[in-house]
Amino acid sequence: MKFLFFILMLSPFFVHGQLHFADSLIQKSSLQETVSFLSADNLKGRFTGSDGATKAATYIVNKFTELGLIPLKNKLSFFDSFPAENYNKKMIGVNVIGSIPSSVANDTMIIFSAHYDHIGQADDLTTNKDYTKKDDIYNGANDNATGVAAMLELAKYYAAKKHNRYNLVFIGFAGEELGMVGSTHLADSLNPKLIKAVINLEMLGRPAYNNCYIISLGNNKVRNMLNDHLKKSGLAIKNFFGYDPYYDEDLAHRSDHYPFAVNIKNAFTIMASSPTDRYYHRVDDTFETIDFDFLLKATRLIAIATEEFTR
């Protein structure tokens, strides 16, 4: 009997406060590695079209390759370029797209996304403020290196689970800070009838209320679906996914789920931080300000909860 108990304790599917499959795969060290790389000074704020953005995109591609993801069907590479403009300055932005093909023949997809671009340095955006000669790099650790880190861990999770019923698509968007240019470009090129859900990840590293909240175009059922799936999975966690507490900030129109949500019911963003966070769009949004214990918890729970859409 003691031996049986020991085996259960080691099982990756043992829940109720013990080890779950997500716990065995999604690790704090991996999240820290991604946030550290993307928010480093040498990427100079990852402004769309910059050398730093190219380094960030290459990092994501390398991670996709390590995990066994392949380019989206009918695409020759992981890169999806699009034209962008910032105050009459033209540039080329690049989305990074990897996929885990369905184990059965169908074209339906579930999209997991997070934007990897940020606002660069100094006056890359005219709205940039509060920088000095000593520090003019907007590192964007929370916005949105944390979202990218979580997205990559979800790719790891679902690649390990295998036998997914739908095509799982993982996207690092560029151009979000320029007005969701990258996500709009992609939404316009995909058939919305083939997209079952878009799960976008944004600013998960400094929780305002020690949970995550759901941003959508009025689809209040999503949070209940996610919370119910956690409960069905045997996790004694109540209402980890809450309502958007910042309704006046109009977040439903400000993140990369929006270009899809116009045509897709289950397109939403999962977020944890306040849009008026003290570090938001500041040069001190750095690695040291991230609550990695929360980011780890949130990523694991998001992985489990979003199985509701992949079944």
Image (tube, rainbow, N blue to C red):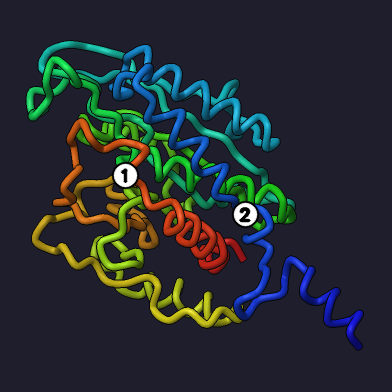
Pinpoint residue 180: horizontal percent, then vertical percent.
Answer: 26, 36
- Residue with the mark numbered 2: 166
Pinpoint residue 36: horizontal percent, then vertical percent.
Answer: 44, 33
Within 10 Å of disc 1 (Cα), the crowding (few <14, some 14-19, many 20+) is few
Q: Note whether 62 is above or below 151 in the view shown.
A: above
Q: Nearer the viewer, residue 301 or 225?
A: 301
Q: Note whether 239 is above or below 262 in the view shown.
A: below
Location of residue 78 by image quarter: top right
Point 45% across, 18% down: residue:
55
- Residue with the mark numbered 1: 289
Within 10 Å of disc 2 (Cα), the crowding (few <14, some 14-19, many 20+) is many
* Element assignment for label 1: helix
Q: Nearer the viewer, residue 212 or 110?
A: 212
Q: Is residue 64 left or right of residue 195?
A: right
CB under 8 Å between callouts 2 and 1? no
Query: Of tags 2 and 1, which is closer to the observer?
Result: 1
Pinpoint residue 263: horizontal percent, then vertical percent.
Answer: 33, 53
Q: CA distance from mark 2 to mark 1?
A: 37 Å
Q: Nearer the viewer, residue 238 or 222?
A: 238
Amino acid tagged 1 = Thr
Q: How many marks?
A: 2
Q: Note whether 6 is above or below 159 in the view shown.
A: below
Q: Residue furthest bottom?
A: 1
Amino acid tagged 2 = Tyr
Locate the N terminus by quadrant: bottom right
* Element assignment for label 2: loop
N-terminal of the two: label 2 or label 1? Answer: 2
Residue 104 visible? The answer is no
Location of residue 83 by image quarter: top left
